[in-house]
Amino acid sequence: MLDDDFMTKCFEDNIEAAELVLRIVLEKDDIKVENVRTQYSIKNLKGRSLRLDIYATDDAGKRYNIEIQRSNKGAGAKRARYHSSLIDCSILPEGFEAEALAETFVIFITENDVIGKDEPICHVERYIKETEEYFNDGSHIIYVNASCRDDTELGKLMHDFSVTEPDEMNFKTLADTANYYKKDEEGIRTMCKAMEEMIADFVAEEKKMAAVRMLEKGRLPKEEIADYLDLSLSVVEQLSEELLSV
């Protein structure tokens, strides 16, 4: 499950798996997930997309972003802040006051101890320095250290995220899903097709990001950018319009 692509497919529309992870990480057995999406894209003010590994909403309207990271580079403090800020921008309905913002949780599950505190889990909260009280703005950032695999529920979950054999997993929900995509013929075909689509999407997104950088420099006409990156002229023109509207 620490493999980004495999995890994406295993959690796709998998409410039961999302509930399992959130209930264990947050130690709240009453979380009821209403929907879960994987590789969910949110655009920032410059029109560039941030792709969330797992994005879920519960029955109370709370939003959860779960990120799986093997590389320490993609799980830094400012990356967590960026995820949190874009989620806020995407969920506030037009015309509503900021007080209507939903409570959000950005959860990084990392292969290594990114925070460096030698703890299985670290909760990052804003607080009032002078009184040492929580600020309670409804924004939460959590780091889960997958290298801690003790006999607690969280440790068992991290064990399941780290093993390659479904038979070695503790939680049936994850084991059944992993078994389907690794050993069932239909599941294997579905996984292969999904991998092909994800690669194609990744390449397309990289081309768009390159086009935006080239448009920002303003050294080449749109036609040449489209030809160089093998993009349609209409896509490059749309990206240009989005830049001008910022």
Image: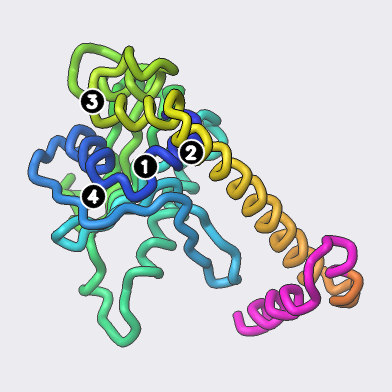
Q: Which mark is residue 172?
A: 3
- Distance, label 3 to label 1, CA atoms, is 14 Å
Q: Quadrant of residue 180?
A: top left
Which of label 3 and label 2 is nearer to you?
A: 3
Q: Circle 2 — which element? A: helix
Q: Quadrant of the C terminus?
A: bottom right
Q: Position of residue 51 (x, y in %)?
A: 51, 54
- Determine the residue positioned at 60% across, 71% down: 46
Query: How far, Cα to Cα, is label 1 from label 2?
Result: 20 Å
Residue at which label 4 appears: 127
As helix, strand or loop, the secondary structure at mark 4 comes to strand
Compared with 185, 82 (above or below) is below
Estimate the spatial distance between the alpha carbons at disc 2 and disc 4, rounded to whole Å: 22 Å
Is residue 222 something one can see in this rendering? yes
Q: Main secondary structure of the magenta part?
A: helix
Q: For the point 23% across and 41% down, which residue is it?
A: 16
The disc, 3 or 4, on the residue closer to the chain's N-terminal end is: 4
Type of residue at label 3? Lys
Q: Earlier in the sequence, mark 1 or mark 2?
A: 1
Q: Mark 4 near mark 1, Cβ–Cβ under 8 Å?
A: no
Q: Which residue is mark 1?
A: 11
Q: Where is mark 2, residue-wise?
A: 75
Amino acid beneath label 1 = Phe
Residue 215 drawn at (x, y percent):
79, 71
How far apart are the two marked residues, 3 and 2, measured between alpha carbons?
28 Å
Magenta span of residues:
225-246
SS under mark 1: helix
